[in-house]
Image: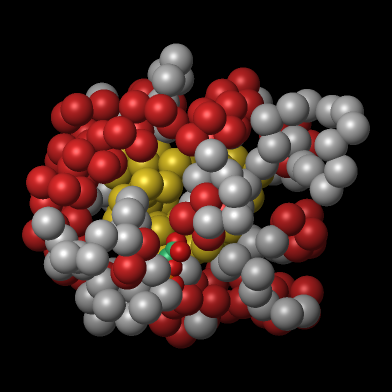
Amino acid sequence: MKLIVGNWKLNPKTLKEAQKLALALNKAKTKNKVVLCPPYLYLPLIKSKFELGSQDLFWQEQGAYTGQVSGSMLKQFKVKYAIIGHSEKREVGDTDQEINLKLKAAIANKIIPILCVGFGIESGEDDEEVMIRIQNQLELDLKDVDPSKVIVAYEPVWAIGSGKAASAEHAEKTAMFIRMKFHIKKVLYGGSTNPTNAKEFLSKQIDGLLVGGSSIKADDFYKMITL
Ligand code: PGA
């Protein structure tokens, strides 16, 4: 059984479309575990037989923090997972220190964090360079965090939304490194996965996929979760 997570990002534009997407996926019969991560506002309004995840959370529980959403708030809307440290959040300012606090806040609220790591290295897949950088990122992100409570998603930044996925071999190698070095139980791959290349990733020692663009196309995601 693999874990397939749909990161809807800032999509779809309307609640109606979001509900339609969730409804279409409800028809899927799958042995995989599927998690849908719609925008915050849609979370309580999505009727899905699959579990829900948020795309982020804030580390404080309450107070003067304009625009933030806490783990305990999300918990009240049946949110079981939270994507943390996505490269699109790191790009707009999330530091490793903040990501570390977010991981702790998720775990304190019994929300399973899906920690995203990865770099946009020019050479693309220089395994050694990737491992060194990822090790550095994970050491900071996981400081004083119980790794057995964290799922990691390896997402090379150059592969996200680019239509150019990493090779399944590189993804597997990196996943094995993360599992062994950091005692992480589950490592996903993310970055330009689609119904055509998903099968190859899932045939490797990779625990599942974090899917962006293809997760908001009902037909594509349906195919991916029923592989
Ligand atoms: P993508 O996004 O599948 O559109 O490349 C993956 C992600 O950002 O998690």
Q: Which residue: 77% across, 42% down?
A: 69
Where, by quadrant of the figure, is residue 223 drawn?
Answer: bottom left
Q: Quadrant of ligand 1?
A: bottom left
Q: Which residue: 65% across, 74% down?
A: 11
Where, by quadrant of the figure, is residue 208 drawn?
Answer: bottom left
Asked whether, in this view, residue 205 is left or right of residue 187, the answer is: left
* Residue 15 at x, y percent in the picture: 78, 74
Q: Which residue: 74% across, 27% down?
A: 60
Asked whether, in this view, residue 85 is left or right of residue 30, the answer is: right
Q: Is residue 46 above or below residue 12?
A: above
Color style of the picture: secondary structure
- Viewer-nearest residue: 107 or 77: 107
Q: Is residue 80 above or below residue 222?
A: above
- Viewer-nearest residue: 220 or 133: 133
Asked whether, in this view, residue 101 is left or right of residue 195, the answer is: right
Tell which residue pokes out farthest to the top in this image.
144
Residue 191 can be seen, yes or no: no
* Residue 57 at x, y percent in the picture: 66, 41
Quarter the C terminus occupies: bottom left
Residue 212 can be seen, yes or no: yes
* Residue 111 at x, y percent in the picture: 58, 33
* Residue 140 at x, y percent in the picture: 41, 28
Q: Which residue: 36% across, 41% down?
A: 152
Total count of labels:
0
Tell which residue pokes out farthest to the front in this image.
122
